[in-house]
Amino acid sequence: MSATADTAPLWTPTPQRAEGSRMAGFLRDLRARGVVPAAVDDVHALQRWAVAHPEAFWGAVWQAADLLAAGPGPPAAP
């Protein structure tokens, strides 16, 4: 196999399907609530932002998942 065949995605969603995904909806919600800056405009930018701001990201995941508990607990050790 060639290097291109090894790295090519097996499947890519249509733009409409990607825009209708839960991840895209999560990103739209984060932007609408001002959790992420407007420059975070796709899932790749969201991933970079999440790595740089893990507490804010996981807090937003906690809220979006509508988890029932007293809180997310202490942050994990690096």
Image (cartoon, grey):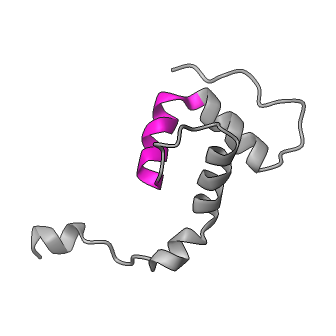
Count of numbered tags: 0
- Residue occupying the point 61% across, 36% down: 57
- Residue occupying the point 55% across, 69% down: 19
Q: Quadrant of residue 33?
A: top right
The answer to whether residue 47 is magenta is yes
Q: Is residue 75 above or below residue 13?
A: above
Q: Is residue 17 above or below residue 73?
A: below
Image spot of residue 67 (x, y percent): 83, 45
Tell whether 53 sits left or right of 70.
left
Tell whether 13 sits left or right of 53.
left
- Residue occupying the point 89% across, 37% down: 69
Q: Is residue 62 above or below residue 2?
A: above
Image spot of residue 60 (x, y percent): 69, 40
The answer to whether residue 12 is magenta is no
Magenta-drawn segment: 42-54
Q: Main secondary structure of the magenta part?
A: helix
Looking at the image, which residue sits at the far left? 2
- Residue occupying the point 57% across, 19% down: 77
Image spot of residue 53 (x, y percent): 53, 29
Tell whether 63 sits left or right of 31.
right
